[in-house]
Amino acid sequence: MSENISYTAVVPVAGTGTRLRPHTYTYPKVMLTVGDKPIIGHILDKLSSAGIRKIVLVTGYLGNKIRDYVDSCYSELRVSYVEQTEQKGLGHAIWLTRTNVSGPMLIMLGDTIIDADLSKFTGSPDDCIAVKEVSDPRRFGVVETKDGYISAMVEKPENPKTNLAIVGIYSFHKSEPVYAALQSIVDSGAKTKGEIQFTDAMALMLKNGHKIKPLQIDGWYDCGKAETLLMTNRFILGRKGTAAERKGCLIVPPVYIDDSAEVGNSIIGPNVSVGAGAKISGSIISDSIINEHATIRDMNLENTLIGPGAVVRGFRNKLNVGENSEISL
Ligand code: UTP
């Protein structure tokens, strides 16, 4: 893939990830594992495979952990960091990058993994926003359209007029009008739901006559909550999970089991990620993420997230059960 020299990607990852507590008490959301690597790794792989090399990460909450990982695993990319010390909203996070970006920009949110070709965005003659039809649009920014372009945009509306949700990718041929709109929002002190919203800046651009096209993408995978993180894990393993073999184990693909994990006497899969140095024995596990250096013994788990280094032990009973007995543990 040739280098897409003109575009700078802005990836805001400063949020505290409250919906993913307790995991986000010690890890920033983008450092949580999904499939074979942290969320931010999937995002950077996507940008890199689209030929984008210049990336600005807006970090804040536990930002050092993100920086350590990115600097050691993605040294081929030109990543710079902007610090958002207070999480005042997505609009504020993007506004902070105004002196780091000029020319075309692509914004990709830190809790979005997509299965779509980014050249649909960078190759379009229009400025674009990714949208997807969702059943309950009230927790998203929602767009209305007219003649193929976006005519209005509202953040988390009580009564959405469409079910087209904004799903975290934005492309602009010129960054200047975006930062000008953000500057107006910041100067005016306008907040929606207590935050400086990027959607409000986009709405202002529309009001000023700016044309933005909605680009529908189906392959959008949210990582914002435990359930959606596990669904995204399923999707990623379905794409690139392996059928690992471990002595004494039944492995039901797709799974990802790190080479350094010790797995014995267990049934693992489908849709299980096991991180480096994890130890699993005597267990049945499906649809779960077991992070690095976690220990699982004698457990039956599904739809489970186990944090790094956590220890979970079940128990084995010795029973002597007579005819017609009924026992539930
Ligand atoms: P979210 O709205 O999902 O917030 O942000 P969050 O903190 O990550 O998660 P919850 O809602 O508390 O569970 C969407 C994206 O915007 C970034 C987040 O890091 C995430 O990638 N963001 C949000 C910022 O960088 N700064 C902010 O002030 C707000």
Image (cartoon, rainbow, N blue to C red):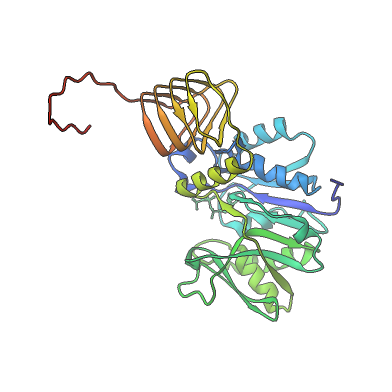
* x and y percentages locating residue 156 in the rendered image: 51, 67
- Residue 28's quadrant in the figure? top right
- Residue 142's quadrant in the figure? bottom right
Which residue is painted at 44% across and 28% down in the image? 267
* x and y percentages locating residue 278 in the rendered image: 50, 23
Q: Residue furthest bottom?
A: 147
Image height of 318 relative to 86, above or below: above
* x and y percentages locating residue 318 in the rendered image: 22, 18
Q: 238 left or right of 281? A: right
Image height of 247 relative to 143, above or below: above
Image height of 321 relative to 190, above or below: above
Q: Nearer the viewer, residue 227 or 158?
A: 227
Q: 24 left or right of 74? A: left
Which residue is painted at 56% across and 42% down in the image? 61
Q: 40 left or right of 318? A: right
* x and y percentages locating residue 280 in the rendered image: 45, 23
Q: Nearer the viewer, residue 313 or 248?
A: 248
Quadrant of the snapshot with the C terminus: top left
Q: 309 left or right of 45? A: left
- Visible residue check, residue 81: no
- Visible residue check, residue 207: yes
- Residue 245's quadrant in the figure? top right
Q: Nearer the viewer, residue 164 or 67?
A: 164
Count of marks overlaid on the render: 0
